[in-house]
Image (cartoon, rainbow, N blue to C red):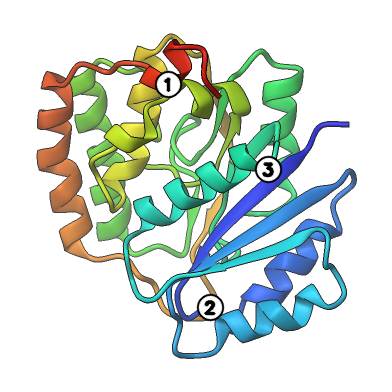
Amino acid sequence: MDKKLVIIPTYNEKENIQAIIAAVFALPGVFHVLVIDDGSPDGTAALVKEAQKENPDTLHLIERSGKLGLGTAYLTGFRWALDHGYDYIFEMDADFSHNPQDLLRLYQACTEGGAQLAVGSRYCNGVSVIDWPIGRIIMSYFASGYVRTVLGMRVYDTTAGFVCYKREVLETMDLDAVKMKGYGFQIEMKYSAWKLGFTIKEVPIVFTNRQKGTSKMSGGIFGEAFWGVMALKLRKITPNPHRAQGES
């Protein structure tokens, strides 16, 4: 049986965290969850620990000392997943903007649809976003268009944070070379996978703005993505040198 891990970064998600964990565990098949909490002062990590009492083998927690960035959280999770033998590694938000049921569709895109990286896409079938301010939709939509133009990568939702990686993708990437830390991280990961020759498929989803808790998005993360994409275009993407030498 495939080992599947859903990585959920958190900062002040006490309103959502136990419900999102329960929703993932209710799916058919076995999904494990790794929460990476950046020192949430609202007690998010304590709620995860409480849930671990009922799910000691399938719910995992990494606590970090402060807000270290979305990208570093996922990189920490990727390394943990590889070290613990997972075959499929997912990224997902804690706030139900991503429907946990769609994890099954992302998994199917990889196991049956030929994808090595499956992207839960808001934009591959028009715009599928509910309850976002129009300004935010426009910024996000045109940011992805800008990325496609600059990088030449045929992915409509380049900043999507709802994805499934086959293990081999993360093993092949040089995770130590990833530069961007905010939402530009999502662009960099997709571009790196594409440049390394992996097959990316977009799975249409409906993205729903959070109903509980506070958004962590700011204008600065779009600035990082804008300038970072220009630098990314000039970089040479190479495989993990340790893997190239036959090391795991």
Type of amino acid under label 1: His
Q: Is residue 198 above or below residue 226?
A: above
Q: Position of residue 199 (x, y in %)?
A: 52, 14
Q: Nearer the viewer, residue 81 or 233?
A: 81
Of badges 2 and 1, nearer the viewer stands: 1
Measured along the vertical axis of the image, is residue 40 above or below residue 210?
A: below
Query: Which residue lies under the disc numbered 3?
Result: 84
Quadrant the N terminus occupies:
top right
Tag of residue 242:
1
- Observer-side mark, 3 or 1, equals 1
Quickly name the residue at label 2: 13
Residue drawn 27% across the image and 44% down it: 184
Q: Determine whether, in the image, residue 64 is placed left or right of residue 50.
A: left
114 left or right, relative to 201: right
For marks 3 and 1 on the same chain, the one whose residue lies earlier in the sequence = 3
Along the line of sight, the residue nearer the viewer: 127 or 4: 4
